[in-house]
Every structure is written in structure tokens, then in C-alpha cells.
Amino acid sequence: MSTIKDVARLAGVGVATASRALSGNGSVSEDTARRVRDAAAALDYRPSSTARALSLQQSSAIGVYVPGFDGHFYSGIVATIDGVLRSVGRHMIAANGCGIGTTRQLDLDGIDFLIGRDCDGLIVASNSLDDDDLERLMERVPTLVAVNRRLAVHRDNAFCADHHAGGRLAARALLARGHRCIATVRGPQDTPDNEARLNGFNGELARHGITVRPEHSADGAFDLPSGDAAMQRLLAAAPGGRPAFTAVFVANDVMALACISRLVQAGLRVPEDISVLGYDDDDFAPYTSPPLTTIRIPTASVATSACRHVLNLCYGLDLPVTRDFPPEVVWRASVGPGPHAPMECP
Amino acid sequence: MSTIKDVARLAGVGVATASRALSGNGSVSEDTARRVRDAAAALDYRPSSTARALSLQQSSAIGVYVPGFDGHFYSGIVATIDGVLRSVGRHMIAANGCGIGTTRQLDLDGIDFLIGRDCDGLIVASNSLDDDDLERLMERVPTLVAVNRRLAVHRDNAFCADHHAGGRLAARALLARGHRCIATVRGPQDTPDNEARLNGFNGELARHGITVRPEHSADGAFDLPSGDAAMQRLLAAAPGGRPAFTAVFVANDVMALACISRLVQAGLRVPEDISVLGYDDDDFAPYTSPPLTTIRIPTASVATSACRHVLNLCYGLDLPVTRDFPPEVVWRASVGPGPHAPMECP
DNA sequence: TTGTAGGCGTTATCAA
DNA sequence: TTGATAACGCCTACAA
């Protein structure tokens, strides 16, 4: 591997001149610049980004932590971030929760690992860490931003869709289609994004005098198996296997996929017998059977803004950033008319 | 940020001693070792991995390129690699195809980007690059290994499941269930993994005197929309909308998901009217409606071995590596009995 | 416009 | 067992 010294020697100039010619910082006569470029090409010179990092005191690396790469939600975020980073010549050191332990510990470990890798900034998606955890982290790493959650203290360093509004939207959608007796498959207890959407949902129902009965509610963990299991529990609790509810709000699309599958296997038709409303609008939502009606979260926008914000923080850039990410309902086939009159919600 | 110099000064020793004490390389008296450790703790010292990389001439970074992070296939690979890497204290610089251009150009750009980031090794998943592309790349980067494809020249640097056997298995599965008139939804033309599985599939059918009729074959691109479109074309070609085929082999599960959805929307029942056989055994396969019968590819094993191989190459390790990844059929509900007698294939 | 030299934070060498 | 010191490859004053 040739270094800038080799290039300088071959071009017959000093290293500083070579450096300036190659980086474009500082003035070099057009003639020598060309000589240097030729020499670099001849030697197939590639600058060492490590040396550059040491000298400049910045690695150009942004650490990205997600609980898992699989699952459509986080992989979309990672893909978006990679795109933004590459467009400004930085790269992504990605880590996900792996090993054994509580999800909180996994998240903490992964983030710690990233911090040890000289990242200029950090983007973290975690719903297992509490506000204190994140605050402590931000104390150590001022360039850390959180996605998909809100923060009390460092508000500007958190980017999150309005899940409360999302939940509200979900309730209105079901009400508007004439459903009154409604079940929910929730996300994991104590995760902020789950809580927000369910509070929004239940709040809106309550506003119309409706509550979800305890036996019509089951917890999942945002993944396939738990979605399936939750629906099984809901079905098992139904007298004679014929549920009283006519619609289910499922806290994410992944679980909704599993719920539909379970419903169909139980001999129930979607949406004729039971309507299913998802959340997230994952890329597979249009392709479930039947296609999934769901609440779209503009995840790509959230990730883009979060990433731009770290970039601004780390490199003094001034990339435009958005903080408002309104969800919307996407009507497909999995929600049908319920037994009651449509209820318009202002 | 404190450096090793600060630690050395506080501990009252030279930097070399501090370095030895902290890294464990070289002998240090127990007493001074403790003093150094205390000083490091007191200063909250964290070694600069950049400086370490420059000095050691290795970055401890492995570049990972996948065409996209979304989609279950690649995200599983990335997650697996991250786990292996972390377990040996290395990290992953991940990149995916982004921007505009042919997929081949995207792949080339992404890999180039990674090469410029001082990665010690590279793991590449691409079915858009041809053998020459990869060979040229390996000339420049001897520590590059390919996953999910075979290579003629640098055979050992490629890790791939036996997709030909996978296709053969798929054919046998359908034959064994009494199907004779069979359709296929293929992956993208000219991609090696698609070709292998389809050659295996068609070859096995041919062995039993069966061929897939041209109008019973459609190309997709391994993604949701193209799977849907392919099935639409198959249906459109059927006289009166009643297809003559009783089963479809779909070249991956993602497209199979879309195919089932399209079939159901066309009023066809799966598997009563049409059986659907997928490929990959993605994590959602048990949760489609009906659950998807598919060919399982041990992707995690492939990724693990590929990763260990780079590790061995880069750092002179001797991690165990496997090269045989046999596929198997996973029976679920989407394939039902066909109109003919079961055919056992030896 | 150019070149010399010092520094970035480690690790490794080598003499003490 | 220790501690100066010289790399590692780049960038950037500073001086010419």
C-alpha cells in the first residue's frame, strides 16, 4: 500500500503539497496538482482513513444501534441512515442486540461497544432503556440522538413520530367503520412507543364511552410468535371460540400478520368476522391476506431527520431537520364494516 | 478525553509501561499494574481505537455489503455477522445499495466505499455482480469473501447454500404431493442463486418427464411488488381466470407472500385450488395465511462460516468453518394434495 | 506556492 | 521490569 509520501516523492514535491493537492485544501499550482494526481493514480494511492481520522480527530463514523436488524421496522431505519451518511461521506458502524441478558442490558452493551469504537456520533433506537439510562448516556456522549422515542430532558436529541396521535387515529378508524366491541394486541409493557399509541387509542375510545374489556386485551412483544400467541389467548378466552369483539387493533404490523394467520387458522374470516387494524405500515402490509389496513408511520422521515441532526451536531453542518411526523391511516382490506352505525369523530 | 499519557503521568510511570499494563502485553509488576489501572479508572480513560488502528495497522473493522437491509434474507445475514464480529471484539461497517443506477453499479459503489474505509476484511452479498467483477475485487482485496454465491476461481472465498439441491427438493416436494401441472415464479434473470434453484427444480421435473409450460412461468425480482405482479401475469394468462396449474413454486418467500395475497384476492383458495411452495424459510413463513411450506436455507450458518473465514484470513485465527449447507423442506399448510398420485422421488 | 516539522494516541523496539 | 523513542499515515501551522 502506497502512502502520501510515495506520491509526493514520485511527483517530486513535498508531502504537504501532495496532501493539499489531493484534498483540495490550500492552494497548489495547477501544474503540480496535476503531477500529484497522476502520481497518485499511478501508485493506486488510497488515503488511510485511519491516519486521517487520527490527525483530524474525527473518525467520520456514526454508530447506529438497533435492538435487531431483522424485522421491517429497524431495518428500514438502518437503510435510511446508511443512505444519508453515505451522501455526506461518512459511514455507519452498526450494532444490534446480541448475546444473552435482558433487552435493557443488551441495548446498554451494544451502545457501550459503539462508544468504544470512536464514533463521532450515535443514533440509538431502543425502547428498553428508560429516560435515566439515556440521559446518562447523553452525558457521556453529547452527540447521541434517540429515534422512536421522546425525551424529557434533551428533547432536541430525540426524534419520534406522534404515536399518541397514531393510536387516536386507529380508534377513529375503527369507530368510523362501525365497530364498538374492540380488542387490542398490545406491544411490550413499559415501552414508551407502545404506551403512547395505546393511550391514544384507549383515550379516544373513552371519549366515546367505549372501553376495551380486560379479556379483550393481550400483550405481545412486537414480534411474530408473540403476536400469534396473543391472538390465541384472545380466542381462547372467547366463549365457544366465537369472540364478542368485531375488530382488533394490533400494536404493530408484524404482530398483525401473525394475528391474521391465527384468525384464519381458527376458521374466522378477516374482515367479515373480525377486522384487523395494524400499525407501522411495514412494506409487507399491502401483501398480507387480506391486505392490511394500518397506521402509517413515516419512519424514513424520522430516521432521516435524526441522522441529519447528528450530522449537524458532529460536523457543524446545517442540514434541514423536521420534527413533526404525523401518522395517517392507510385503508386496505383487513378492516371491514362493523355491526354498528359509522361514528364520525371530529 | 484523557490519553494514555495522562494515565501514565498520574500513575507515575512511562507510557510504555502504562500501555503494557492496560493491554496485558508484556510484563509489568503487579504493583505498578494496579497503579496504572487505578489511574485509568480515575481518569475514565478509554483508549483511542483510531490510534490503536494506526499503530497496529489494522482497523478491527469488517465491511459488510448487502444490496438492501430490508427484506428478511439480508437482514438476517447482517445480524448474524454482527454477532460473530462482536464476539471477537471486531466491528462491522455496514453498507447497502443506495442511490440510483443499475444494481450492479450500486453494488460496486457500495463495495468501493467500504474498501475506502480501511476495513480489514469484506463480506459481500450480491447477485448482480458477475464472476469477473468479484475476481477483480478479490485481486484488490484478498480478504474479501462472498456469501450466497459460488465462485469459480477463489472457491474458498465463497460461501453458499446448495441452491441446486434446494430446487430439486422443491420439485420433489410438489411431485410427492401429487402435483404435475406446475407454475414457477422465478427470481431475477442472470442471478446465480435464482438460476441454481430453478435449474435444480426444472431438472428434477424433467427427470420425471414434466416441464413447466412457458405461460406458467413469470419472472420476479425477489421483492414483494414483483411477486405480486408475476402472479397477476400468471393469472391473466389463464383462460377464464382458472389456471391449469395446481401448484406454484415461488423462488423466495417474500414473493410467495405476495403471491398468496394475489391468489386470495383473485378468489382462489390456497392450498385447495392452488398450492404455493416458497423458498428460504424466512421468519414470517410460519405466519402467512395459510402458513407457508418452503425450502429452508440455513442462512445463519452460511453467514457464520463466511464471517469466521474472513476472521481467519484477517487475523490469523483458526475458527471452525463449515462449507456444506444442505437445504430442507419445511412442511406447513400452503401446499396441499394435488390431483395426481403421489410420486416418490429417490 | 512550496516544504519542513510537529502532532494526533497507540504499540513495539531496545537499551537500561 | 522499566521508560525513551520511533514508528503508523495524515494534516496543518509556520516559514521560506
Image (cartoon, coloured by chain):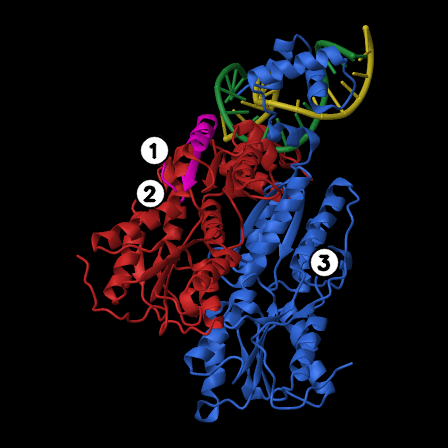
Chain colours: A red, B blue, C yellow, D green
Mark 3, residues whose alpha carbon is within 10 Å: few (<14), some, or many (≥20)?
A: many
Q: Is residue A315 visible?
A: no
Q: Secondary structure at mark 2?
A: loop
Q: Secondary structure at mark 3?
A: strand
Q: Is residue A10 left or right of residue B324?
A: left
Residue B150 location, quadrant: bottom right
Q: Nearer the viewer, residue B135 or A138?
A: A138
Q: Is residue B291 depicted above or below B346 in this figure?
A: above
Q: Which residues are magenta?
A: A132-151
Query: Marks 3 and 2, Cα distance to the nearest angstrom?
Result: 42 Å
Q: Is residue A231 visible?
A: yes
Q: Nearer the viewer, residue B284 or B91?
A: B284
Q: Is residue A132 left or right of residue A97?
A: left
User: Tag 1: residue type?
Assistant: Ala
For mark 3, what is the residue?
A: B158
Q: Nearer the viewer, residue A177 or B33?
A: A177
Q: Is residue B79 magenta?
A: no
Q: Is residue D13 depicted above or below B208 in this figure?
A: above
Residue B70 location in percent, x, y?
51, 57
For mark 1, what is the residue?
A: A152
